[in-house]
């Protein structure tokens, strides 16, 4: 799963995002037990401080600075480099799954009951230019 992360993704009112994360985290731990691979590739689209604890053990890609450079940020060299890294991570995970002969088998899958972002503290920000 490639998770496009911004404060709204972690917000408690978007419960399904946290359940999706918890489910993929569980699958990754089951499928890649002790191998340093996971099933989640976080891409930080908008800077979030502090990040939820669920992101701490995972290497993420931060495109927040590039994404604010204008409407054509996707053509910038830095953005393309980071997306190449994401692609290579996807390939590494896919090869790891294929090497282990792991198949989806979704018929018995159940979502966890708790969001992975229960510890996330929302911060309200004042409207720009207001004090």
Image (cartoon, rainbow, N blue to C red):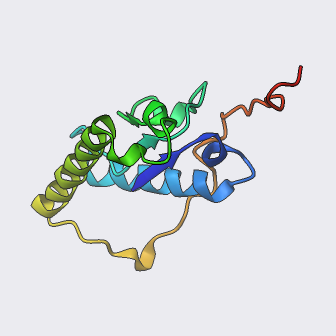
Quarter occupied by the N terminus: bottom left
Q: Nearer the viewer, residue 67 or 4?
A: 67
Extreme-top residue of the structure: 131
Q: Nearer the viewer, residue 77 or 114?
A: 77
Extreme-left residue of the structure: 99
Figure quadrant of residue 116: top right
Q: Can the viewer see residue 41?
A: no
From the top left corner, tell me how far across and down residue 53 is, in percent: 54, 31
Q: How many marks?
A: 0
* Vertical arrangement, residue 93 with respect to residue 47, above or below: below
Extreme-right residue of the structure: 131
From the top left corner, tell me how far across and down residue 81 is, in percent: 25, 39
Q: Is residue 34 left or right of residue 10?
A: left
Q: Residue at x 52, y 68 (%)?
A: 110
Q: Residue at x 63, y 51 (%)?
A: 114
From the top left corner, tell me how far across and down residue 93 is, in percent: 22, 52
Quarter occupied by the C terminus: top right
Q: Can the viewer see residue 110?
A: yes
* Vertical arrangement, residue 126 with respect to residue 79, above or below: above
Q: Residue at x 42, y 36 (%)?
A: 63
Q: Nearer the viewer, residue 83 or 33?
A: 83
Q: Nearer the viewer, residue 126 or 103?
A: 126
Figure quadrant of residue 59: top left
From the top left corner, tell me how far across and down residue 11 is, in percent: 69, 44
Figure quadrant of residue 79: top left
Q: Is residue 64 left or right of residue 116?
A: left
């Amino acid at each position: 799963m490639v998770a496009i992360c911004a404060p709204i993704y972690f917000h408690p009112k978007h419960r399904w995002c946290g359940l999706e994360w918890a489910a993929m985290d569980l699958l990754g731990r089951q499928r890649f037990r002790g191998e340093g691979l996971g099933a989640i590739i976080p891409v930080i689209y908008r800077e979030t401080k502090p990040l939820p604890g669920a992101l701490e053990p995972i290497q993420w890609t931060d495109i927040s600075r590039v994404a604010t450079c204008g409407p054509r940020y996707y053509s910038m060299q830095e953005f393309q480099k980071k997306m190449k890294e994401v692609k290579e991570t996807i390939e590494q995970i896919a090869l790891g799954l294929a090497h282990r002969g792991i198949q989806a088998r979704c018929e018995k899958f159940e979502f966890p009951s708790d969001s992975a972002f229960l510890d996330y503290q929302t911060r309200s920000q004042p409207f720009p230019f207001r004090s």
